[in-house]
Structures are given as C-alpha cells and as structure tokens.
C-alpha cells in the first residue's frame, strides 16, 4: 500500500483563507438583531444613566440559538465520578451548564445561551438606529451648517504633496510610456533599447492628486427643551424613571443631531434653566407649579428660539401632582407651548399602584386637543423604552397602539 | 517552529503503517495536511470539510471555538480526521514530534474504523469530499440567483437544520417505498390461511386504510416534507435534500463516538508501545496519552470510557476469570473479538454488551437529575441500581439524545395538517425549543403542524399554525 501523502503547511495559503468570514459576519448581524429585540429589557435592567459611554454591558443573547427537538429538565444524565460517589451528592449547579466541565455525551440546550459584551456606545447606536425626531420641518430661513467634513471628490493633476495618489501616479506613468511606444510603432516593451528601459522617469503630468472638498450639509434648526419636575413629591423612584427617560432622549439627540440645541429646565414652584449635569444629578424639593416650568420654557423660546426659525421639541416629566390652583395656568401655558412646538410630550411618572389615588394631570391635559401633544404614563422601568419609542418612532401610529399607555 | 521536517513525519508514518498492518488494521489511503490553529478552528467549524456551504451557524461555531481557545477554556484537538476515501486528516503544525507520531497512529485507528464499521457503509466515503463540494456549489448558486437570494436560502436552511436529525436511525435497513408499505399493510391485514377455517369462526375483516399518507409512520421529516409539500420550489426541495444528506453522513459518527475514540486510542497506545521509542519520546507519549484518556469527573470522556471497554473486551477473551469462563465460552482470541466488535456494533450495542457491572463500578458511573437548581446524584452503580444507571446511559448517548418523532398523518382532519407523534420514553421535550422547532416545521410545511407528546405526564398536543404556538391537552 502506498505511503500517506503529507501536505506541508503553506503560510500564504493560510493567510488567504478566512473561510468563515462571511458566516461570522452574518452571525454578528444576528447578534445585533438580538440585542435590538431585547433592548427594552436591557434598558430596564441596567442603570445606564450617567455612565460613561465606554462602560461595558453584558447582554444575554437569545436570538441566535439553533433550535431542535431536545429533551427538557426531567431527562436524567449519566456522569463519571472520582470514586465513592454517593446518591445525594450535588455534582453541578444551575440550568445553564451540565455538571462538570468535561465532554458530555448529551448536549444540553442551555449551553447555547451565552452573553456578549457591548459598550454603552454600541448599545445606544443600535437603539436609536430606526428613530428620528418626528415632524422635523424645514422651518428655518437660516440654517445651521451641520457637518463640516472633508470629502473626497475625484482626482486632479495639481495638488499638495500629501494628497499624492502613488498608485494612480504609477499607473499614469505606465500608461504614458505604453502610449508613447505604441505611437512610435513599437508594441512590445522588450523591443526598446536597453538604455531607454533603464530610465523611465515620472513626468509632471503623471502626478495625480486626490481632490478633497469640504462637505457642508445644512440642517434645520432644532431645539429640545427638557422640563423636569423636581419637587418634593418626586421621590427617588420617580426621579429615577424621569431621568432615565430624559437620559435616553438626551443620548438620542446627541447621537443623531449634532447641531440640535438642548435646554434643561428644572422646576418646582419656580423654574430654573440648569446645566445638563445639574439636571441629571441634583435633587431639589418644594411644591409644584407646573405652569412655572412651561412659562420658563416660553420665556426662553421668545428670547432665543423664535418659532418661525426653530423646530421646537418640548418634553416634560412630572408625577402629575400639581397644586390645584395652578391647573388653569398650566393648561393655558401648555396650550401656548403646543402652539409653537413641533412636538410636545408629557410623561407622567406613576410608579405602580400610585396611579389610582394620586392626582393626575392627564385628565386636565385631555382637554388640550392638539395633534402634536402626546402623553404617556410610565409605571415601571419596563415602560421607559416602549414609551420613548412611541414618542419618536418614524412610524408612530404603529408603535403607539402597542406601547403607549392609554391616557 | 517544530524541530522535525516533513521527511521525518513520512519516515515515522511508514513505520507506523507497517505496525498497523501487522496488527491487522485495514485502512483507506491516508492524506495528512499540516495546518495552523486558525485553519484548525476553521475545519472544526465546518466539520472538517475542505468545502462546505455557508450558513451563519458555522460562523457562530467558529466564534465560539475561537473565544474558548483564546481564553484558554479549551485547547484544540491535535488532529481531525474525516470519513472519506482517501481519508483526510489535519495535523496541528505546532505539535511536537511525539504528538505527531501519536496522532498519526490515532488517525489510522479512526481510518480503520471508518472503513470497517457497518454504520459507515452507507456514507460512500469515496464521494465525501466531492459531495460536500457539490452541495456548497449548489447552495451558493441559489444564493447568487437574483430570484432567490441569501435571505430565503437562509430561512430554509435554518428550518432544515432544526429538523435534520429527525430521521430514520438505522440507515442500513432499506427504506420501503410508499407502495411497498401499502402492500405490506394490505398483506398484514389479510386473514391468515387457517387449515381449520371450516370449524373456526371467521375473523372479522378490518380493511386497512390504504389511502392514508404516510402508509407507515415516517421518521425522515425533511424527506417527507420535500416529497409531500407540493408548494415547495425546486431549489427549496434541493436544500432539504442537501441538509438531509449531510445529516446522513454525520449520523454514524454520532452513533459511534465512544467506540470510535476508544478504538483509535486503543491502537495509538498499542502501536506506540510496540515502536520502542527513545525514552524521552516515550515519556512524553505516556503523559500525552494519559491527558487524552483521563476521566472527566462529572462528565463522560468518550476516549476514556471507550478505551476501558475495548480493554475489557480483550481481557474477557484472553484472560477470563473462571466465573466468566463458566458463563459462556467466548472462544477466539482477544484480537479477533476486537475486530469483530468494531465491525458490527454501535455505541449503544457496544456498551449494552460489554459495560459490565464491575466495569461500571470501576468507572464510578452515576446518574444525576436536576433538583431545583442543582444536579443531584440519584443513583450509583451499586448492586441494585447499576442496571438503571446503564439504561440511562444508553439513552443519553448516540441518537438516544434525539427525541423520536414520527409523522403519522399528512392530512389530519382533512385540512392538510401535519400530525406527528413523539414516542415519549419518560423524558419530556423542552417546550421552548419544541415551540421554535415547530415554527420552523410550520414554515416548511406551509400548513398547521401538530405534535402529540406528554408534558408532565399529561398527553398534550403542541400545534403551530398561522396564529402561532399552542399547547392543548389531548382529548
């Protein structure tokens, strides 16, 4: 019988063959899809507020399992002990893995469950992929130049040295040489004289430079006003929910619109314009005049952001516990805001159970029947993401009937 | 870089092959390819095939293997052999000379097993590589076809993969055609010739339902769907065929994992012991060998169990205890018994016949069950319970881990519902998985699918239709 054939290792071949690249790419896509599908859970689970964007979050991946008919938990298994194993010994824990780490004859489906690390940045990107500020009109007469970016645009024969395209230049040279030769009736390079072959300098007309233009894209002016109730009745839980909500909003705006301006207003009985940091981290107390927040927003708008020039988005979070005497004023200012804003959202934070005995602004705001006014109720962490989507989805009607709570 | 050349390997290969011949191993021509860890990961992800159709599950498998390798959770195998003629094996470039020698000997063990074990007879080893290549080519052509595209191919492959192992277990038995099944059904329903029919009461004649499809319960789910769902396009049928054929190829390896690894370990040990290696190589061999065949506490190492049982078979014939002699004259030499067993058995029969009470106790095999969050030992191989432990073991190896599901009616209730029965053996299906698998099945069948099973002791029908999944107690 002939001896075996040995095929030696060839380095070049190994470098070339990354056969699983396509399948890995598709698998990663599926992982991303899975993250997107589970985002409501992730947002609810993780306290992502104020965390650095580099923070790594563990995300359990469920979408990429390969399903088959398999046996469930009541199927016993057989393992090997180290001697003296007695009935009643505990040999393993949890549903995720079988006992021990050895090769198991059976393949528990639980092993298909694994976690992946994503940074908050990636997560936010994935989350906001299909969201946009709704009803963004080109209201502006004056536009903000949105992105100044250098963009490649073709090639030129003149340029600065750093933009010299060496490959194209070399190609131009070869092309020129061949063309000259063909013109002279010579078709094969070998036929030229040895002296010519030695020296083939670059000519100025060979030099090719990349041409770069500055890309200015105009974007409509937009301002987002975040108004939050920071009164005493907003307890830790409520503030946490409100802040999570605004945090998402803020991250969304920061990711998507570079030139959008943000205004933060915190109010109790009085309203103040605050910085982003104060808005997310500072606690206050006192009674509640919702109208004060709205009035402040109106003041700022008339001062700095005229509605004829700016797209205006107003979001307000409160627990709805307003002083009765302030209600008429709140309704009036809300109506004014709805008139000038593209979208005016009111989120009422009602931790589970408190919805039925605490006072609510929802009844009051029902009288405000403007198309661009929306209310949502947030009862628990899990509501944040759906209601957020309801505000911002491109296709708002579709999400609204599944996610927004009846107001 | 290793301190040996290809010429060294060829020299050692010649010596090993001579030894293997003298021991009576009967092998296909052998080819070795030296590869690095990246290639090896790639081959592992694609079941060793040089050419394989694309699917994201292989990308997933690659990522998983690579992660585990990068973090040192698991190493890489020293080799990988595929069942083909000539047999193709991959050797890791970074192995030491001793490991390569061990591995080459090990590979010949697998090679002999592939060639001679009856389970592999239907795999047509001479066509393995070209078949997989043709499959890859066909799948790619569907992906590139603008009227089909990646997504639709992936959808069918996803569904087909979910069902690929639901097939007839013993491929060596010829499958009857529907007409033959019908003929058999008809004949078996005929009254037997009775010489005393004059005095016996005539038995009541029950005409068989010959219009029923399938005529007999059908285990090849993918093939049945391929043949009986008239709405599938040709390329969809072809994808189902491809996935089915690959599953057929791998089924024997699932069925003989313990035997096969034990057999290869047995022969690499025999061959290397007979080589009279220089002492440094021999010492390294002993260390490596023991790493490979050591028991894995809590799990089952097929190398370990397999080798133990092969040793036991040899001992039983060459050196039986007086008691064993009395019980049955085994006859024949130990080697004859080994070769006969390697041809005729699969894991289940192999362990059923040769895993004795004594051996089970020596291996300290136990049965565990899940209690709340823990896995608790419920039975050990003592006098009372060893048979139970053995039965459980036989159910959890080979195809015992795959629930037996048969199609009994393709037109249930007269509305083309696909009705299947799970042959429940005390182990429930994992419902979450069953639901998603039925979803795949529903997509392939195009109409409602129903699976009869037992859930917590109650007969239950799991259905999947356009409204989604439902589990109803059976009437």
Image (cartoon, rainbow, N blue to C red):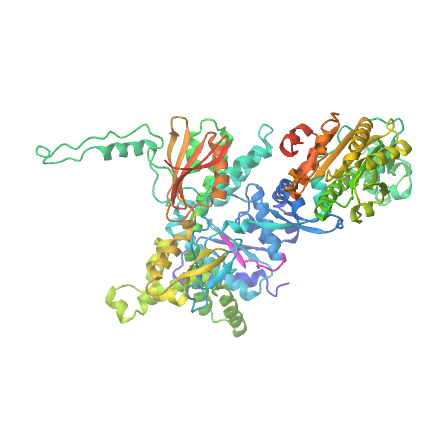
Relative vertical location of residue B182 with respect to residue B13 in this rendering, above or below: above
| Residue B409 percent across, percent down from the top left | 37, 32
Residue B197 left/right relative to A228: left
- The residue sitting at the left extreme is B199
Residue A282 left/right relative to B249: right
Q: Is residue A202 in sight in this rendering?
A: yes
| Residue B474 percent across, percent down from the top left | 38, 37
Identify the image quadrant of residue B326. bottom left
Q: Is A73 part of what is drawn in magenta? A: no
Identify the image quadrant of the N terminus of chain A: bottom left
- Residue range (magenta): B70-81
Q: Examine the residues drawn in magenta and state their main secondary structure.
A: loop
Identify the image quadrant of the C terminus of chain A: top right
- The residue sitting at the front extreme is A325
Q: Between A183 and A46, which is closer to the camera in this rendering?
A: A46
Q: Between B83 and A20, which is closer to the camera in this rendering?
A: A20
Q: Between A210 and A374, which is closer to the camera in this rendering?
A: A374
| Residue A235 percent across, percent down from the top left | 72, 47
Residue B223 left/right relative to A58: left
Q: Is residue B168 in sight in this rendering?
A: no
Q: Between A33 and A325, which is closer to the camera in this rendering?
A: A325
| Residue A245 percent across, percent down from the top left | 73, 41
Relative vertical location of residue B168 with respect to residue B392 in this rendering, above or below: above
Count of numbered labels shown in the rendering: 0
Q: Residue at x 65, y 34 (%)?
A: A405
Q: Is B71 part of what is drawn in magenta? A: yes
């Amino acid at each position: 019988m002939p001896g075996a054939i040995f095929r030696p290792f060839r380095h070049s071949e190994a470098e070339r063959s990354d056969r699983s690249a396509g399948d890995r790419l598709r698998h990663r896509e599926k992982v991303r899809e899975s993250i997107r599908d589970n985002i409501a859970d992730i947002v609810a689970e993780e306290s992502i507020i104020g965390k650095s964007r580099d923070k790594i979050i563990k995300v359990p991946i469920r979408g990429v399992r390969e399903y088959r008919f398999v046996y469930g938990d009541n199927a016993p298994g057989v393992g090997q002990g180290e001697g003296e194993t007695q009935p009643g010994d505990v040999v393993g824990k949890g549903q995720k893995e079988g006992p021990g780490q050895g090769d198991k004859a059976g393949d528990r489906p639980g092993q298909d469950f694994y976690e992946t690390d994503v940074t908050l940045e990636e997560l936010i990107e994935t989350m906001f992929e299909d969201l946009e500020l709704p009803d963004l009109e080109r209201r502006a007469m004056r536009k903000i130049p949105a992105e100044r970016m250098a963009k490649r645009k073709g090639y030129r024969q003149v340029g600065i040295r750093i933009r010299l395209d060496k490959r194209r230049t070399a190609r131009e040279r070869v092309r020129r040489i061949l063309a000259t030769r063909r013109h002279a009736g010579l078709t094969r390079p070998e036929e030229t004289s040895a002296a010519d072959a030695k020296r083939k300098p670059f000519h100025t007309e060979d030099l090719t430079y990349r041409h770069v233009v500055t890309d200015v894209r105009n974007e409509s002016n937009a301002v987002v006003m975040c108004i939050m109730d920071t009164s005493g009745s907003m307890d830790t839980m409520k503030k946490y929910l409100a802040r999570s909500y605004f945090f998402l909003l803020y991250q969304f705006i920061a990711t998507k619109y570079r030139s959008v301006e943000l205004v933060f207003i915190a109010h109790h009985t009085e309203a103040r314009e605050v910085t982003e940091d104060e808005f997310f981290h500072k606690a206050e107390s006192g009674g509640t005049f919702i109208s004060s927040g709205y009035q402040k927003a109106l003041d700022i708008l008339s001062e700095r952001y005229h509605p004829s020039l700016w797209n205006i988005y107003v979001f307000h979070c409160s627990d709805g516990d307003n002083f009765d005497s302030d209600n008429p004023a709140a309704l009036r200012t809300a109506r004014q805001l709805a008139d000038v804003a593209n979208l005016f959202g009111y989120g009422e934070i009602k931790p589970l159970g408190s919805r039925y005995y605490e006072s609510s602004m929802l009844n009051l705001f029902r009288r405000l029947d403007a198309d661009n006014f929306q209310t949502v109720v947030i009862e628990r962490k899990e509501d944040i993401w759906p209601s957020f989507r309801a505000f911002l989805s491109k296709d708002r009607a579709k999400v609204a009937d599944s996610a927004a709570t009846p107001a | 870089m290793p301190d040996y050349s290809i010429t060294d390997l060829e020299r050692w290969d010649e010596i090993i092959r001579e030894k293997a011949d003298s021991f009576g191993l009967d092998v296909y021509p052998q080819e070795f390819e030296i590869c690095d860890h990246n290639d090896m990961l790639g081959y592992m992800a694609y079941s060793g095939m040089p050419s394989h159709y694309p699917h994201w599950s292989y990308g997933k498998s690659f990522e998983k293997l690579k992660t585990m390798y990068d973090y040192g959770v698991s190493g890489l195998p020293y080799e990988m052999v595929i069942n083909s003629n000539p047999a193709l094996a991959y050797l890791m470039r970074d192995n030491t000379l001793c490991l390569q020698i061990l591995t080459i000997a090990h590979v010949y063990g697998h090679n002999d097993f592939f060639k001679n074990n009856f389970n592999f007879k239907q795999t047509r080893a001479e066509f393995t590589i070209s078949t997989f290549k043709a499959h890859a080519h066909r799948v790619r052509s569907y992906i590139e076809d603008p009227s089909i595209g990646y997504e639709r191919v992936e959808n069918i492959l996803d569904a087909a993969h979910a069902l690929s192992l639901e097939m007839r277990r013993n491929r060596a038995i010829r499958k009857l055609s529907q007409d033959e099944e019908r003929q058999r059904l008809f004949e078996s329903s005929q009254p037997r010739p009775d010489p005393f029919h004059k005095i016996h009461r005539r038995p009541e004649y029950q005409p068989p339902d010959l219009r029923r499809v399938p005529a007999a319960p059908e285990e090849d789910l993918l093939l049945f769907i391929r043949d009986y769902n008239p709405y599938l396009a040709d390329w969809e049928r072809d994808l189902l065929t491809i996935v089915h054929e690959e599953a057929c190829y791998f089924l024997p390896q699932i069925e003989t994992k313990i035997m096969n690894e034990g057999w290869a370990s047995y022969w690499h040990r025999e061959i290397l012991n007979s080589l009279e290696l220089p002492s440094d190589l021999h010492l390294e061999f002993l260390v490596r060998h023991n790493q490979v065949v050591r028991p894995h506490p809590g799990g089952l190492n097929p190398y370990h169990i397999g080798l133990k049982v092969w040793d036991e078979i040899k001992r039983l014939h060459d050196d039986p205890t007086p008691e064993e002699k009395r019980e049955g004259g085994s006859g024949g030499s130990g080697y004859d018994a080994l070769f006969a067993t390697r041809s005729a058995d699969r894991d289940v029969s192999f362990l059923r016949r040769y895993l004795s009470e004594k051996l089970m106790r020596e291996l300290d095999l136990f049965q565990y069950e899940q209690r709340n969050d823990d896995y608790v030992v419920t039975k050990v191989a003592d006098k009372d319970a060893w048979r139970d432990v053995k039965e459980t073991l036989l159910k959890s190896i080979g195809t015992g881990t795959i629930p037996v599901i048969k199609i009994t009616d393709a037109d249930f209730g007269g509305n083309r519902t696909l009705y299947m029965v799970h042959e429940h053996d005390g182990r429930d299906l994992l419902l979450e998985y069953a639901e998603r698998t039925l979803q795949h099945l529903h997509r392939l069948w195009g109409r409602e699918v129903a699976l009869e099973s037992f859930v917590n002791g109650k007969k239950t029908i799991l259905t999947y239709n356009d409204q989604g999944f439902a589990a109803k107690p059976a009437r």
